[in-house]
Amino acid sequence: MVQLPDRVSRLEELAYDLWWSWTPDARNVFRTLDYPLWRLTAHNPVRMLQLMAAETIAQAAQNLTWVAQYDRAIARLDSARAAEHTWCADKCHPVGGRSIAYFSAEFALHQSLPIYAGGLGVLAGDHCKEASDLGVPLIGIGFMYPQGYFHQSLSPEGWQEEIYEKLNWADAPIEPAITPSGKPCVTAVPLGNRTVLVAVWRVRVGRVKLYLLDTDLEENAPWDRELSARLYGGDRETRVQQEIILGVGGVRVLKAMGSEPAVYHLNEGHAAFVVLQRIRDFCEKGWSFDAALEEVRRTTVFTTHTPVPAGHDAFPFHMVEHHLSGAWGDLGAYRERFLALGHYDNGSGPMFNMTALALRTAASVNGVSQLHGEVTKQMWQPMWPGTRYEDLPVKALTNGVHVPTWMSGEIDRLLKKYLGEDWLDHHDDAAFCERVNDIPDAELWAARQSLRAFLFDFIRERAREQWTERAAPSRVVAAGTMFDQNTLTLGFARRFTGYKRPELIFSDPDRLARILNAPGRGVQIVFAGKAHPADEGGKHHLQRIYRRSLDPKFGGRVAFVEGYDLHVAHFLVQGCDVWLNNPRKPLEASGTSGMKAAINGTPNLSIGDGWWAEAYNGRNGWLIEGQADPNDHGAQDWADAQAIYDLLEHQLVPTFYDRDAQGIPRKWVEFVRESIRTVLPQFSARRMVKEYVERMYLPTVNAGSASVQP
Ligand SMILES: *Cc1c(COP(=O)(O)O)cnc(C)c1O
């Protein structure tokens, strides 16, 4: 680490608090400090401080403008951490001085901390950031995966290869977590008939803390050191052990760190073993199993994220029993009763199902969109025999995105100018957002043109890197170098998996080719995304799309950008003209990339599934609605593809290319404006986290303590 001059001695502290990443003043401190290094490190201030020359920083400390910027950022950081005048300061009295523990197997906070795979992680990261902004006393618990999720590399044939690289911990914004007694936190977790030690890293996210569990300690056996190495990288045995570490270990870590959460929020079933350790703790204080279960249920909140069966972890009972054998303690007498809490038979025999465990042990359960709330009820109704459908205890609480994280500088500038410098303070207020109507067409269109240009710079730079590294001409075409800056550009970036139907738009290649290649009114499509390492089908989809990008029939108008991550996502959601989403309904529980796009004026062209079913209003984007029997997948796919072509030919293309004398597509700009105006307030993480506090956390706290006596 470079020696910091006294005048700017807190720069390191700023670099280690991810709060900088969503605060323009703080971002600019690093951005202007050494712009080439900022780009070279993909915006990683911790790494910048490792690499930086002492003279650079010494010079900066003499630069009055930069130092003033630094002072502003530090003052804002202190005030964010103090959280004195936040929304929660007024609201959260019932929580007292206690915290909300938020458990998740992945957190996507920044590309410098690769501990996420996709949407679930982004949601968790956005939840933490917004909790910090609102002053909600949240503590996140997750995993430090030293090898993270994989880097994607495509073979010349377009086959995905997964590269796991050991993270250089000195480059990540993590520090050892220190217990109240001043020692680095190391916690013992019983696993099978042995004990695994878990080290704990702390990540600062403004006011919110995140603890990351790590088994890569010298004291552990080699196979135990590997347990936390990779996110979703192992087999079922690895997975169940990871989940025991997260749940059982996570509760122990909170205790070691001196926290006593008022509420435990399980973000997806992966963390449901939290309830095992908690019931055990009550039993060891002399409570009965029933009283302990009731108290744990009263203080547990559970969010389920997918209607896709493979998304719900289930393990054979013998496997669970084997790995839990050391975890029981005084709960041992109730082993059978505990195991019964996870019992679920989806038709292929009884299994220990993590979602079933969470559903039976949480007082508050929610799906992540209005539609997904209903789908969740239908899917899990057998869990509540005798309960009427309308009384099933499942709420719908729609996802949102952290606006300061996903908002582009260009649109932010316009919002500051026309809604006020403090627009962020009111951004979940729909009436306030009406003022988006005051932004002149010309300025909105100019912002969109700039955002598209940034995307093209990014695509070209990536292509240049590939050319340098691998010197394969075909790759350069596949990477989007033939793209034209003034052509209507669709974006499709998400995990490659069957239900998202990534190849749908190629259903009728000839018709698509005519649309893409129309002279002067063409269309181009940029794809990005990873397939799960074990999803062969997903990899085949990806490969076939890659081949399309090389097919001369499409004239270089189809591109694939490798290595989809938070960094790539920013350029894509902001720079494309239209965000395409065509899942098989109703399998997309929510989807959040479309929200990120919409708040930047990139309207959605989507199936009415997940969030879009409640966001689409006829003027803020387009609805894909092929008419067919939904049980006949082939017919539905064909009908949906035809609907996309019809919309492109008759609506999107004419609207985009119809310009007035000043070169502005007035009707298109209306879609841009309406997209921002309607999605910004309603699909913000601000609205979402407020709802979690009001509908999930506070009722839990207010319900008082257990009615059953210990
Ligand atoms: C937002 C985001 C996702 C989730 O997008 P969906 O629309 O839910 O598929 C996945 N990966 C990255 C990198 C993201 O930024």
Image (cartoon, rainbow, N blue to C red):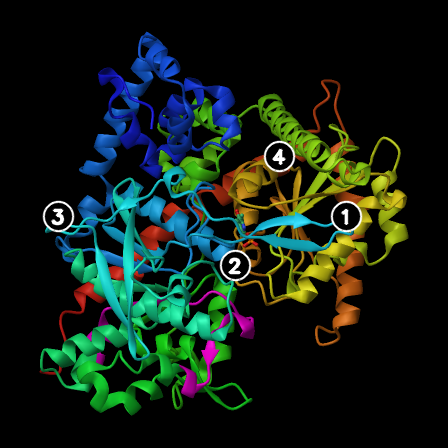
User: For the residues marked 3 and 2, what is the alpha-carbon distance in whole angstroms?
Assistant: 43 Å
Of pointers 2 and 4, the one earlier in the residue sequence: 4
Q: Tell me the residue that label 2 is attached to.
A: 590
Residue at 52% across, 85% down? 346
Magenta segment range? 293-319
Give residue 463's quadrant in the image.
top right
Q: What's the amino acid at mark 1? A: Pro
Q: Earlier in the sequence, mark 1 or mark 3?
A: 1
Residue type (three-letter) at the residue carrying disc 3: Gly
**Cα distance in 3D space between marks 1 and 3:** 53 Å
Residue for badge 3: 182
Dot 3 or dot 2, earlier in sequence: 3
Asked if the magenta segment contains residue 146, the reply would be: no
| On screen, residue 549 above or below 502 | above
Q: Earlier in the sequence, mark 1 or mark 2?
A: 1
- State yes or no: discs 2 and 4 in contact (Cβ < 8 Å): no
